[in-house]
Image (cartoon, rainbow, N blue to C red):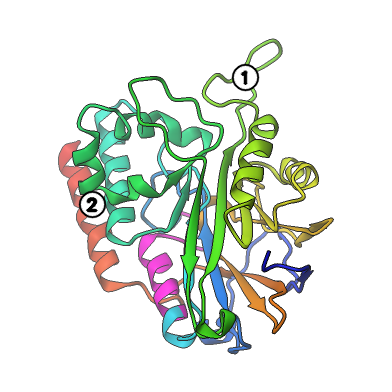
C-alpha cells in the first residue's frame, strides 16, 4: 500500500452565525503553491439552484463554482483537481413539471462542466430514479454523462432502475505524484443518511448507512491508495462512520449544517461541506518522498470576488428564461 501513514494539517475553519463579506482577494484565498500533489474541490446542497443564494451576502451558484475551479487550475498548474459533489444537488420534490425541468438543468450543467464524483443524498433519489430507469438508460447516459459519475452504497433502487455504483476509483497523474512515474488511485464511497420520519417509522429510500458502509469500504480499500467516504450526513454521523471504518483516510460530511474545524478519528480525517453550496471545500493532498500522505483543508466563499465563468453564467441565464417560459 502506498500510504504508510497519515498526518493532517488543517487551516482552522469555524462556522459563524452571521456571515460577513470576505475582503480577501481570490488570489489570497487560494494561497501560495506549497507543493500540493492533488486537490479535491467539493460542494454540496445546491438543492436544484444554479443561481447565487437569495440572501444578505449572496454566494454560490454554478458560474462561481466553475470560476473557482478554473482559477485554481490556472494558479496551480502542477496540482491536478478532482471535483466532488456531496449530495442534495437536485430539488427533492420531483414529479412536478417545473421541478423536473429545474433538475434536468442541473443534470445538463453537471454534464457540460463535469464533476468527477457525484454522491447521492437522500433528497436526490426521487429524480435520480427517473434518470436511472432501464428504459432508455443507454441513450440518457450518453446525453447526460454525469449519470456515469453517480455513487451510492445505500440508496434503494428497484428492478426497473440501473443502480449506481457504491464507489468509484479515480486515477490521477501529475508531476508531484510519485515523480510522475505512476498514478494515484483515489476511491470514493458514497452514502446518504436517512430522513427521520418519526417514532416507529423508517425511511425506505436508503438502507442503514453504517451497516452498508463497511463492506463497500473494505472492497474499495483493496483497489485504491487513498480512500474517501463522501456522506450526506450530519457531523456526528460522520464521526461515527470514521470510527467504524478506520480503513478510510477521509470522511466528508456534506450535511453538517456548517463548516467546522476538521476532526481526527484515529487515522481518519473528517471535514465538512457548507450548507446551500455557498462555499467551495478545498482539500489539498501532499505526498512525501516515502509516499506518506497529508492534507490541508480550507473553504472559500463563492462571493462576488470569485470570477463567474462566462459560459456557465450564460447557461444559468438561459435556464432561468426556460423556467420562466414554462410557468
Q: Element type at marker 2?
A: helix
Is residue 146 placed above or below 203 in the rendered structure?
A: below
In depth, the one of 163 and 12 nearer the eye is: 163
**In this view of the protein, can residue 253 be seen by the observer?**
no
Residue 290 relative to residue 312: left or right: right
- Residue 55 percent across, percent down from the top left: 50, 55
The quadrant of the picture occupied by the C terminus is top left
Mark 2 burial class by Cα count in 10 Å: few <14, some 14-19, many 20+: many
Q: Residue furthest right?
A: 266
- Going from N to C along the chain, the mark reached first, 2 or 1, is 1
Q: Which residue is mark 1?
A: 197
Is residue 159 within the magenta segment?
A: no
Residue 104 relative to residue 302: left or right: left
The quadrant of the picture occupied by the N terminus is bottom right
| Disc number placed over residue 319 in the picture, else none | 2
In depth, the one of 68 and 162 nearer the eye is: 162
Q: Which residues are magenta?
A: 54-72
Q: Element type at marker 1?
A: loop
Residue 27 relative to residue 325: left or right: right
Residue 131 relative to residue 140: left or right: right
| Residue at 39% across, 45% down | 48
| Residue at 62% across, 63% down | 225
Mark 2 and mark 1: span between their CA atoms?
34 Å
Is residue 70 within the magenta segment?
A: yes
- Residue 230 percent across, percent down from the top left: 59, 49
- Residue 126 percent across, percent down from the top left: 40, 28
Q: Quadrant of residue 9?
A: bottom right
| Residue at 18% across, 47% down | 322
Amino acid at each position: 500500500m502506498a500510504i504508510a501513514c497519515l498526518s493532517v494539517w488543517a487551516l482552522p475553519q469555524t462556522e459563524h452565525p452571521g456571515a460577513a463579506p470576505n475582503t480577501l482577494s481570490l488570489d489570497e484565498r487560494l494561497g501560495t503553491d506549497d507543493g500540493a500533489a492533488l486537490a479535491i474541490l467539493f460542494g454540496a446542497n445546491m438543492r436544484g439552484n444554479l443561481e447565487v443564494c437569495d440572501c444578505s451576502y449572496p454566494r454560490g451558484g454554478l458560474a462561481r463554482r466553475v470560476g473557482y475551479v478554473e482559477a485554481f487550475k490556472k494558479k496551480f498548474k502542477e496540482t491536478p483537481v478532482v471535483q466532488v459533489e456531496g449530495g442534495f444537488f437536485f430539488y427533492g420534490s420531483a414529479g412536478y413539471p417545473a421541478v423536473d425541468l429545474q433538475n434536468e438543468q442541473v443534470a445538463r450543467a453537471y454534464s457540460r462542466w463535469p464533476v468527477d464524483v457525484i454522491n447521492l443524498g437522500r433528497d436526490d433519489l426521487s429524480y435520480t430514479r427517473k434518470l436511472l430507469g432501464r428504459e432508455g438508460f443507454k441513450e440518457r447516459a450518453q446525453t447526460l454523462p454525469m449519470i456515469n459519475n453517480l455513487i451510492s452504497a445505500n440508496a434503494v433502487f428497484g428492478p426497473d432502475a440501473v443502480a449506481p455504483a457504491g464507489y468509484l476509483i479515480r486515477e490521477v497523474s501529475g508531476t508531484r505524484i510519485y515523480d510522475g512515474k505512476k498514478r494515484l488511485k483515489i476511491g470514493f464511497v458514497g452514502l446518504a443518511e436517512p430522513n427521520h420520519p418519526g417514532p416507529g417509522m423508517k425511511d425506505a429510500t436508503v438502507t442503514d448507512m453504517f451497516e452498508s458502509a463497511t463492506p463497500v469500504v473494505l472492497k474499495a480499500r483493496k483497489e485504491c491508495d487513498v480512500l474517501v467516504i463522501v456522506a450526506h450526513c450530519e457531523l456526528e454521523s460522520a464521526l461515527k462512520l470514521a470510527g467504524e471504518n478506520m480503513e478510510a483516510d477521509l470522511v466528508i460530511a456534506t450535511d453538517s449544517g456548517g463548516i467546522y474545524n476538521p476532526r481526527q478519528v484515529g487515522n481518519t480525517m473528517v471535514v465538512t461541506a457548507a450548507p446551500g453550496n455557498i462555499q467551495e471545500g478545498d482539500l489539498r493532498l501532499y505526498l512525501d518522498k516515502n509516499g506518506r500522505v497529508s492534507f490541508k483543508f480550507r473553504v472559500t466563499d463563492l462571493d462576488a470576488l470569485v470570477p463567474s465563468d462566462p459560459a456557465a453564467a450564460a447557461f444559468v441565464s438561459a435556464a432561468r428564461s426556460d423556467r420562466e417560459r414554462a410557468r
